[in-house]
Amino acid sequence: MAWNDWVRGAEVEPSIYAADFSRLGDDLGALLDSGAKIFQFDVGDGHFVEPITIGPIVLQAISSLFRERDGILDVHLMVDNPREHFRAFAEAGADSVTAHVEVVAGEAMEVAAEARELGLAFGLAISPDTPVEDAASHAAEVDLVLVMGVRPGYSGQAFIPETTERVQRLRELLPPEVAIQVDGGVGAENIEELGDAGATLFVAGSSVFDGVDPPSAYRRLTELLA
């Protein structure tokens, strides 16, 4: 299985990093039952990004929920040495891993091959100051390109407006089979324009895990894309 098999058109991906961890299993189950299929799992190492976030132990704890409901766990590795973590995440239940082009640009082909040998799909992420051409040049090796709409590291940041133009430029450069994912600051106020620019995967953290009713917040975003 790969991204072309998972994606049902435009997909809203709830970002687990923004969830209330005191009720994580209940909220993830409710979202899966409400139609959410692909979820992002953000990993920060305290080096590439300032915060240390969550790791394979948490992913393993929730993976049974996803297997029971045909859900997909999409791991975003905001780390200096992503290839050292592929096996642990594959064994914990990950379906796809995304590494930052800023740390793997010189070895993207080898890194992608290592991920795929473990049964993982592979993507490249670009931070706001990185030219989109840096990722587009590796289009042959990737399933998706993740465009950061905020500085990587912390959930809840304000969306950087120039991201929309970056998505549009990237869509011009990439072949149609390579998906564009946007992560950071995605919500009701910008999800439609990002879709019009060429994105098809929309990582939504605070705008889904709003502390009130994540399934309703998820459905509101998917309705805007319909």
Image: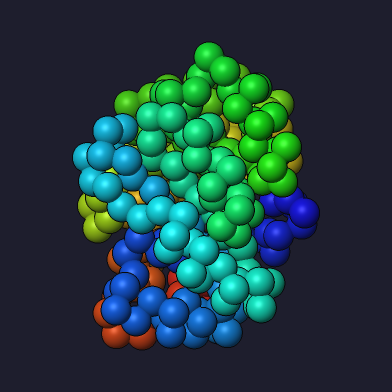
Q: Going by the image, does 175 lie left or right of 32? A: right
Image location (x, y in percent) of residue 75: 51, 50
The relative height of residue 200 versus residue 187 in the rendered view (above or below) is above
Quadrant including the N terminus: bottom right
Q: Going by the image, does 17 lie left or right of 111? A: left
The relative height of residue 80 versus residue 208 in the rendered view (above or below) is above
Image location (x, y in percent) of residue 36: 56, 73
Q: Going by the image, does 214 lie left or right of 179? A: left
Quadrant including the C terminus: bottom right
Image location (x, y in percent) of residue 161: 31, 43
Which residue corresponds to the image point at 60% horizontal and 27% vertical from the top-left? 111
The relative height of residue 226 versus residue 91 in the rendered view (above or below) is below
Q: Nearer the viewer, residue 13 or 54?
A: 54
**Residue 157 in sight from this viewpoint:** yes
Task: State which quadrant residue 145 falls in.
Answer: top right
Task: State which quadrant residue 87 falls in.
Answer: top right
**Residue 220 in sight from this viewpoint:** no
Image location (x, y in percent) of residue 173: 61, 27
Task: State which quadrant residue 112 falls in.
Answer: top right
The relative height of residue 123 versus residue 9 in the rendered view (above or below) is above
Which residue corresponds to the image point at 66% horizontal and 32% vertical from the top-left? 114
